[in-house]
Image (cartoon, coloured by chain):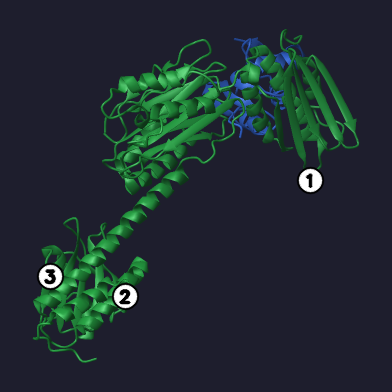
Chain colours: A blue, B green
Amino acid sequence: MNDASVSVHTTGDKVHFTISGDVDLANASDIEAELTAAIPNRAKSVTLDLSGVTYLDSAGLQVVFALTVKLRRLQIDIRVIAPEDSPARHAIDMAGMASIADIELSY
Amino acid sequence: MSPTDGGERPNDTERLRRIESVTDAALTHLDVQDLLVELLERVRETLDVDTAAVLLVDEVTNDLVATAASGIEEEVRQGVRVPLGEGFAGRIAAEVAPVVIEDVDHSEVLNPLLRERGVRTLVGVPLVVASRVIGVLHVGSLTTRRFEPDDVEFIQLVGDRVALAIQARRSNVERTAASALQRSLIPERLPAIPGLELAGRYLPAGEGGVGGDWYDVFTLPSGRVGIVMGDVLGRGLRAAVVMGRLRSALRAYALDTVEPGEVLERLDRKIQHFEAGQMTTVLYAVLDAGLTTLQVASAGHPLPMMSTPGSEVAAVVADVDPPLGVDSGVRRRTTTLDVPPGAMLALFTDGLVERRGESITLGLERLRKALGAGSAEQRCATAIHSMLGGAEPQDDVALLVLRREDGGDSPPLRVKVPAVATSLALIRTALRRWLAALGVSERVGFNVMLGVGEAVANAVSHAYGPSGGTVGVDMSCSAGDIVGTIRDTGRWRLPRGQNRGRGIKIMEKCADEVSVDTTETGTVVRLLFHIAKAAPA
């Protein structure tokens, strides 16, 4: 069983996602669907907080990567929060995505 | 058969014959139900009456229920019930004395069968055990007749015999049921949890029947481990039944709620509503999936003993809230403790440390010393031996010992799972525990988790067609290196889609060495990680 959860907090045109738990091949596409469904067209910026993610594999990274590409095309800002020493940051580093995807990593 | 008109007092020979007819040694070989039927038949013959029946008190409804009959067998088949204190049979039970009605006024008889049969004369005696009425035996005649005091005395003699037989059966049934129930509720085999040694003992009290002690260990879907030690106040079948209900309820709440204090709060609400007045002490603890921290909540239960490598065994320092079932209205607290590799935890019920005429402090001190060294099984055996010796316990005794393995004795990990995406979580749970037992750094842990996870995900995504297959993961650790081997028996197809190849790149980044061998019989991925220094980032 995977116990990942997504919570959404929308203020005006800002959408803040907090993801926690394990994200892998088994639940990545569900999470992707949940994220995209919660972003309204009027959104100007999206924050993806991965601080509470306990495991992130390449399928999960793919979701982050694809969302970044999609939002950039729609001219919506995206910010990914993945603190140093967190499992999500580790996965992003291992995939060399911090530079490739030009993800802004904040704390 | 012609009913005698009575009146004549039976002589001594006749009285002796009567007594012999119902104390015949052959009767002792019958089981209780057959004995009742046989006795009732002999009573009918001896007194030359038409009906004889035994009704027993149903302790729940307080009705008299027809249990055995002769001459009116349908009474039993129809399950005739008479409220205690009403009607003929009810009156006997209420008065605790024989009742004779020579000319039955049918308004007085509630039993429809006796009315239909046209019973004219009735004699009944109470069945008494330890000055408590457990039922009624009555005989009836279709013609009006007189019953002499000797006849009534004879019926009472049979009644006493019936009462004793029933009581013996009841206590035997209750004792057997309670101990069978108890046995079925104590785990026969504790779950196998990699990285954790478990040993448990339950010893029922020597006298007075089993009590309501129980323990339980279960894994939760999140990989956490639930640990329970409880004691339902009271003993016998009732305590065992309540214990069974609480055990299931606690497991159910544990599925929904992580925090032990909250699980106990819910259990408390359940007891107060459904088992009102039942006091129970429970200790509930949850180990996280990595077996590194323990959350504990106690509802009036003795706190566990714990030791960590290099420290003495001591009682855990944690909050203790009131027992369940006493409507304390408190918020139940949870204490979190570190569980380093090699740590030992012992949960027990008071029966283990309490001894008549001895202070509990002495008992606790003896237990503390007995838990000092060895595997969980050795500590459990030593503690039981030193606490009880050869003596039969005066109260129920339960003891559960857990020991987290340390790096030195961490055996290789071997897991085989179906090649489906949901298996990834199972592999991670096993890996987290295995790594926690090794005590490697967080960085190495991340690398192993992600590297092995990607290799398994590759097998899941690429090795098999729709018919599926399995993936095996073997982990071992020696000479400062962790080696992971991930095997499937399928044939990898070329990576497709946007995510192509990223998994393999991640594996190469995480591990210090990677080899992928694809043959006709399947693919073997071998990953090597140095423990001492982290893989290059």
State the image coordinates of residue B198 (x, y, percent, origin top left).
54, 29
Q: Chain ID for label 3?
A: B
**Residue wearing tag 1:** B467
Q: What element carries label 2?
A: helix
Q: Mark 3 points at which residue?
A: B98
The chain holding disc 1 is B
| Disc 3/disc 2 C-alpha distance (Å) | 22 Å
Name the residue located 24 percent from the left edge and 91 percent from the top edge.
B1
Q: Is residue B163 visible?
A: yes
Mark 3–mark 1 distance (CA, rounded to whole Å) = 78 Å
Residue B38 disc label: 2
Percent position of residue A92, x then y: 71, 16
Cα separation, mark 1 vs mark 2, equals 67 Å
Image coordinates of residue B460 in percent, x first then y, are: 76, 35
What is the residue that sits farthest to the right in this orientation?
Answer: B520
**Residue B425 in the image: above or below residue B52:** above
Where does residue B409 sit, x and y in percent of width and height? 64, 20
Asked if marks 1 and 2 touch (Cβ < 8 Å), the reply is: no
The answer to the question of whether label 3 and label 1 lie on touching residues, with beta carbons closer than 8 A, is no
Residue lying furthest front in this view? B13
Residue farthest along the bottom direction in this orientation: B2
Q: In which quarter of the image is the C terminus of chain B?
A: top right
**First of labels 3, 2 by sequence position:** 2
For disc 2, the chain is B
- Relative placement, left or right, of B450 versus A34 is right
Q: In this view, does B410 lie above or below B120?
A: above
